[in-house]
Image: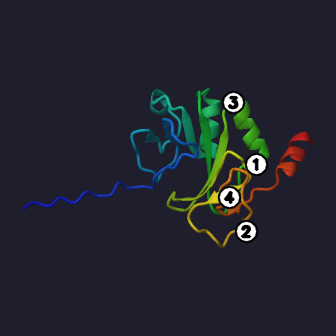
Amino acid sequence: MRITFRRRPAGAAFVHPIDPAPRTAVLATGFRETKLTRVFPEGWNERAARFSPASVAGPWVQVLQVARAGGRVEHSIVVFTYPGEPGLSALERESLWNAFGVPVFEQYLGPKSELLATECDAHAGLHVVNGYEELDLEHDVCSCGNRAPRLTRGSRIDELAALLS
């Protein structure tokens, strides 16, 4: 009898905030590819453009490259933030909306690209998915109905005031 062991694919699974997930170009290292997700660790380039993603995910700098290159996105943008970095600002979010005209989501990732918290459609903070309890969390039920604690990213009133000033 022959037993074959399959190696687990290297990298973290990318979890798209909208279900069903569209064709997504992930512009960061540390992720594994799937049928609908392709990883481009070198960032936006001709190969990524040929993939024709409906959604793009990556750190702010990489997503900004897509906008500067005139890349088209039809579904959504997912911006990765990491421990020790500031969250996505209202101005950054607004500039991505102006560039692409699609919803913008933030995902907070760990050092091995594992998903720690993700933003929902209500954009009222990032829902914690991996028990990251040492963060300053909000425990009220989100307007999306999710009861998971949220990592707050400032109030919407503060964001609107910053946009108007």
Q: Which mark is residue 85?
A: 4
Kindly identify the amino acid type of the residue bearing the numbered disc 2: Asp
When the figure is inspected, residue 152 is found, relative to residue 80, above or below; the finding is below
Q: Are marks 1 and 4 in contact (CB under 8 Å)?
A: no
Q: Which mark is residue 101?
A: 3
Q: Secondary structure at mark 2?
A: loop
Q: Quadrant of residue 4?
A: bottom left
Q: Quadrant of the N terminus?
A: bottom left
Spot occupied by residue 111 in the image (x, y as percentages of width and height): 54, 62
In terms of sequence position, does the residue under pointer 2 or pointer 1 come before the other? Answer: 1
Q: Are marks 4 and 2 in contact (CB under 8 Å)?
A: no
Mark 1 or 4: the one toward you: 1
Neighbour tally class for label 2: few under 14, some 14-19, many 20 plus, Cα within 10 Å: few
Mark 2 or 1: the one toward you: 2
Give the farthest residue toward the bottom: 134
Kindly identify the amino acid type of the residue bearing the numbered disc 4: Glu
Q: CA–CA distance between discs 1 and 4?
A: 11 Å
Q: Which mark is residue 136?
A: 2
Q: Are marks 3 and 2 in contact (CB under 8 Å)?
A: no
Give the farthest residue toward the right: 165
When the figure is inspected, residue 2 is found, relative to residue 58, above or below; the finding is below
